[in-house]
Image (cartoon, coloured by chain):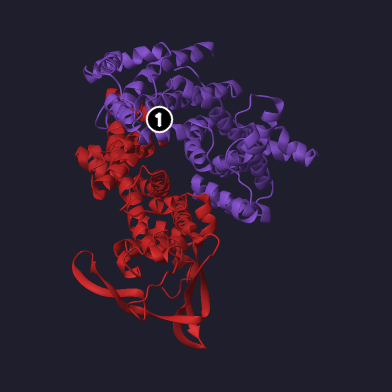
Chain colours: A purple, B red
Amino acid sequence: MTRYILRRLALLPLLMVVYSFVIFVIIQAPPGDFLTAYVATLASSGSSMSAEQVQALRQQYGLDQPMIVQYVLWLQHLLHGDFGLSLEYQRPNADLIGEQLGLTLALALFSLVLTWVIAVPAGIYSATHPRSWGDHALTVINYVGVATPNFMLALILMWIAFAYFDISVTGLFSPEFADAPWSLARVLDLLGHIWLPALVLGIAGTARLSRIMRANLLDELNKPYVVTARAKGMKEWRLVLRYPVRLAFNPLVSTIGWYLPLLFSGSLIVATVMNLPNIGPLLLRALVNQDMYLAGGILLIYSFLTVLGTLLSDILLALIDPRIRVEG
Amino acid sequence: MTTLDAGTVAEDRVAVASNWRLVWWRFRRHHLAMLSAVLLIGLYVVVLMPDFFATQDPERTDARQAFIPVQMVHLFDDGKLAPWVPAIAGKRNPVTLRMEWTTDKQRKVPIRFFAPGHRWRVLGLFETNLHLIAPADPTQRIFLLGSDRLGRDQWSRIMHGTQTSMTVGLVAVALSVILGVVLGGISGYVGGKTDQVIQRVIELLQSVPTIPIWLALSAALPRDWTPTEIFFAITVILSLVGWTTLGREVRGRFLALREEDFVLAARLAGCSQMRIILRHMVPTFLSHIIATSSLAIPVMIINETSLSFLGLGIRPPAISWGVLLQEAQNIQTLALAPWLLIPGLVVIVAVLAFNLVGDGLRDAADPYSQ
């Protein structure tokens, strides 16, 4: 087990190098380089930059050199924790990303928890009451949930809240807490706001997971050991929860591998629509304004989170289900 | 034949029916899927000739006719079949200085079916001015689904958006299928080192954070590209990741089938490799490919809509469902003109229909299973 985890961890840097190269090629692709855009931005805001400064920056980033050299330089800076300077915000990219990374993670993880808390009981109910009205209703919700794009759901909810209840459901904090230092009151305020975007983000996943849970549990409920237990007079709810639910759970854990990365990249859209402090909208702005090193840094973070999510789920799965072979 | 009872006849029919016939019989039993299939066929008719369904030029703007509400079609007037829409009446709000429109059911604007309107070209071949719905007075403008902030007719724009969005889904999935079948097939049939390389590439692509990378790729597209070039670039970007699922599936099928007796028999009978693959192996899982790809189309549509909504997919002046929804981005505008959300409902209905058809096909794809 330890060997398996270590081997997977050893593979992580290699993957990140591959991703960083692909990302660099993509952010390089638009015409013009970082400095031409930088100088243009400065000129438009009225200030200017001396030729020496431009030259210094050009050397710092090696913009006069071939792409592959530029890439190696970028990588070197990254390894020293230097994500470069944002031309739009005039601040280090690492600070910009760092400020919002925590809330980005919080949103995705909260959404994951919410998904499970809703999907598992819903799946158990559907499986123990197949073809009942409740089951049919959940089937309909499932289809509509999967068919509704995240941003559409966010728009509809925001519109209803605004037009009929005259409340704003955007943002993660009430105005008085937006820039306040962390305190218990601020955490409670966050919890009061985060559930709606988390629900919007997780709705499709919730629908899908509850279906998987239902199918798995239905398979288990038909097995002889369940019949035996029932024949021996075991209480129904105890009978269901004791073994079949636990067994139906395992395939669900393996979904974290693709679901967590999905939440990270899906949060980009929800956060943009609902105006949440998140690295998603930051990336969108950076891409539109050709703030290439900021975009590159955020893309790298996204890749890292994605790889990490997959790794976590694989380890988790190996831990809870000893039947899964980890060697070979 | 007359001496046999009906049950035996039915059994005989099943026994001699081809694989495709069995799939069709099974699919037909799935009522929701059948209904959805009809709906999708309808949508693709719109794709073929959006102008026929449009009531006016989708680009026609008129700032004085902004945010006109939905004019509902009424079929009967005084018990007679005489279709009409209520006229609109505008009044300037003295406080906000904004035009506020109401529909006036007392004043009726007569409309005609299959009536002349603006000129358009059928599939680019010949000109006509026939439209499904047109106002009886050609100088009048009607807004079946309201108008946007520039006074463009949303109904006509949705028809044109349908053409783009439904085509993006189809083309992107077609590209994914080609990539997936070819690469997955090579991977499964050749095996060895080639298989290893392709599998690693698939793993790499599958663990990419899709939406951010798609956005970055779209942002990298040159600004001076024409809408058609952008359109194809977006479909290629979407299918870059899309093919991997199918590639995996095809590979698995090839691996399993390679050892089957009927493939061995074909080989011993002296069939060429191409013939074994195309004539003996592919038909056994073709229905699965169709089912899987029909479930991939709605995913592509949602992705395209999301990218366009964020401003990095299909770009105006091209019209797609996502482009239309950009108009609904501002919550104040939305409170004023909630009908701007209608393109979103179209997306949901189309995706729902694709999912239902896909599910029906998947269940029907293996007619010998129970």
Residue type, mark 1 in image: Val
In the rendered view, would you say B267 is above or below A90?
below
Against B334, is B303 above or below? above
Quadrant housing the C terminus of chain A:
top left
- According to the picture, the residue beneath numbered tag 1 turns out to be B208
Q: Quadrant of the N terminus of chain A?
A: top right
Q: Residue at x 35, y 74 (%)?
A: B132
Q: Is residue B302 visible?
A: yes
Closer to the camera in the image, A77 or B217 = A77
Residue B23 is situated, as x and y percent measured from the top left of the image, at: 41, 56
- Left or right: residue A325 compared with residue B170: right
Of A232 and A155, the residue lying toward us: A155
- Please state the horizontal and vertical placement of residue B123, each as a whole percent of the image: 23, 64
Q: Position of residue B232 (x, y in %)?
A: 27, 46
Chain ID at mark 1: B
In the image, residue B60 sits, relative to residue B186, either above or below, namely below
Disc 1 element? loop
Quadrant of residue B225 within the rendered picture: top left
